[in-house]
Image (tube, helix red, strand yellow):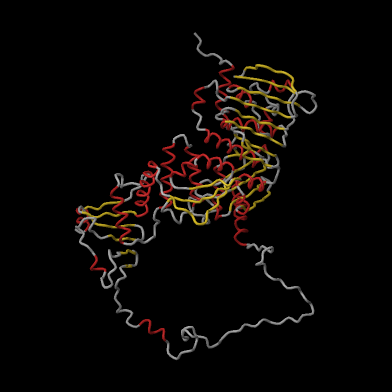
Amino acid sequence: MDIIQLLPDSVANQIAAGEVIQRPSSVVKELVENAIDAGATEVTIIIKDAGRTLIQVIDNGKGMSCTDARLSFERHATSKIKSSADIFSLSTMGFRGEALASIAAIAHVELRTRRAEDEVGTKLTIAASKVESQEPITTPVGANFSVKDIFYNVPARRKFLKSNQVEFSNILTEFERIAIANPQIAFTLSHNGTEMYKLHSSSLLQRVVSLFGKTMNTQLLPINVQTTLATITGFVGKPENARKRGAQQFFFVNGRYMRHPYFHKAVINAYEDIIPVGEMPNYFIKFEVDPATIDVNIHPTKTEIKFENEQHLWPILSSAVKEALGKFSAVPSIDFDTDDAPDIPIFNPNMQVKQPRVSYTPGYNPFNYNKAGVTKVANDWEKLYNNFEGATTKSDYTVKADDDNFSLPPREKEENKTVEQSVVPAEQSVAQGAYIQVKGRYIITSIKSGMVIVDQHRAHIRVLYEKYINNIEKNIQPVQKILFPEIIQLSPAQTEIMSSIESDLSSVGFEISNLGSGSFSITGVPEGSEGINYEELLHKFIDIATETGTTDVTLFKRRMAQTLAQSAAIPYGQYLTYEEMEHLTQELFKLPEANYTPDGKPTLSCLTNEELEKRFK
């Protein structure tokens, strides 16, 4: 009996949809790219419930006839390929003809479309790949796609969708990629009745500023290089604006977003020795190449693109970035509109030019003047070195060696007590033992079984983490008011996330007010977090919320407490008093999990008496 059979169209469409339509953001991407291919100059995107309920894309493109509207939902129906040779000279976004068929297989779809030459348009309704109706209708020129109840007939796929916050974040990511690649097109994005973006036709720099905030206007450097292989344009970030997380990094080729690790390394190579290890710069780089030299047909989402001349483009790209960075570093800028502008005199040809003269005091001796500026006969500075070698250290309590610096502050301020007299025998307990700080990093103290070396930064992270978690669970986190509120500016995408985690931030001690238009005022911070860069910390919280979502509240709050503890912990290099070392060590030893930080790094190391004895045999 034969066991191989052809799949029904409905099943085949659902399988194909799994490759093309992975989540609501995939629907947005495919529909907006179709609008761009249709020559639209204005695109409106309406989202409800992060795309679960509704995804609507309206454009003013050329539209479709009633026959084309019906054929567009068939698999492998496309207007962009006539023969196999066309695959290697593509200049449009979509070309496979699978997008609309895949969308129609897993949702309720309604299409309203009309061409400029037609008096009436067409309304087409499809559900699960089945055409329910097609009728003439009055509608504006262009296309209006409404996709409702995504994955309604594939409950397993719908169950694996993330929270609304995560899914909408993915939609914003796709929107940003398309909007940057096409700054000449006006875009409007609304979510649950709230207008998130209204972008007008503009230049690339204006589009980037509209998406990511006004601060980007002063953080970017232009690049522009033209060769026979490619034209490379765009912007790269200044070195001082590099970030460890959340850097905006975009590559585009012929108007299409792409991921390209090889070219990414070329950009990072240009920043070598300019930014700290682990930090990433912003960049928005566009390639214009001959379509015949690239292959976009190697991935269903068309984000992985193969170049014919990758190895030759590497040095061109790296040199372009280095040139931009070099011009920024070498040429200072002068703003002549400010009050500090240099006063340039008007040229007078009749004025006699005088040679400048330098005035100085020939007999000046910096070591031969007293406080009043009167010359003295004796060199008083020599008295500073009297008995220098015989001086003894008293009440200093800091010993410095060639390689190691360690301090041993006293328990009490005693004027005449020497370092040697303050040392306590090693066999005594922690409560009675001595605390020595080495290199501003480690605290060494004695215990009954030997000696303990504590990493002061990691130990403080552990202590603060337990404190913050305990306060969050009891909702008693003390708040410290700020005398001068700090204002931060967020993009619409970040504003959406900030609004969803505002109550969680309040539980750890932040008081934040929404001023509108993406501006937030920080009026209160967690007690004991002085000196922290709060704007950078809040950006970290937004990144954590984007990664984890807010459905698992416990996980999010633990990550937030960990990040806050890492930011507020005692830094390396800070020297501590005896009381501070004693307090930190004892607070650490009180914890049930004192040996490791929340992310699993050791906080202390023990040397037993037996190990110490072996070292001196």
User: Farthest residue toward the top?
Assistant: 1
User: Is 227 positioned to the left or the right of 399 in the image?
Assistant: right
User: Is 145 positioned to the left or the right of 580 in the image?
Assistant: right
- The residue lying at 28 percent from left, 53 percent from top is 586
At which x and y percent is residue 206? 67, 47
User: Is 203 positioned to the left or the right of 431 in the image?
Assistant: right
Foreground residue, 269 or 303? 303
At which x and y percent is residue 180? 64, 42
Foreground residue, 100 or 407? 407
Foreground residue, 208 or 163? 163
Which quadrant does the C terminus fall into?
bottom left
At which x and y percent is residue 76? 64, 23
Q: Which quadrant of the figure has residue 77?
A: top right
Q: Is residue 144 visible?
A: yes
- The residue lying at 59 percent from left, 23 percent from top is 107
Q: Which quadrant of the figure has residue 178?
A: top right
Q: Which quadrant of the figure has residue 308?
A: top right
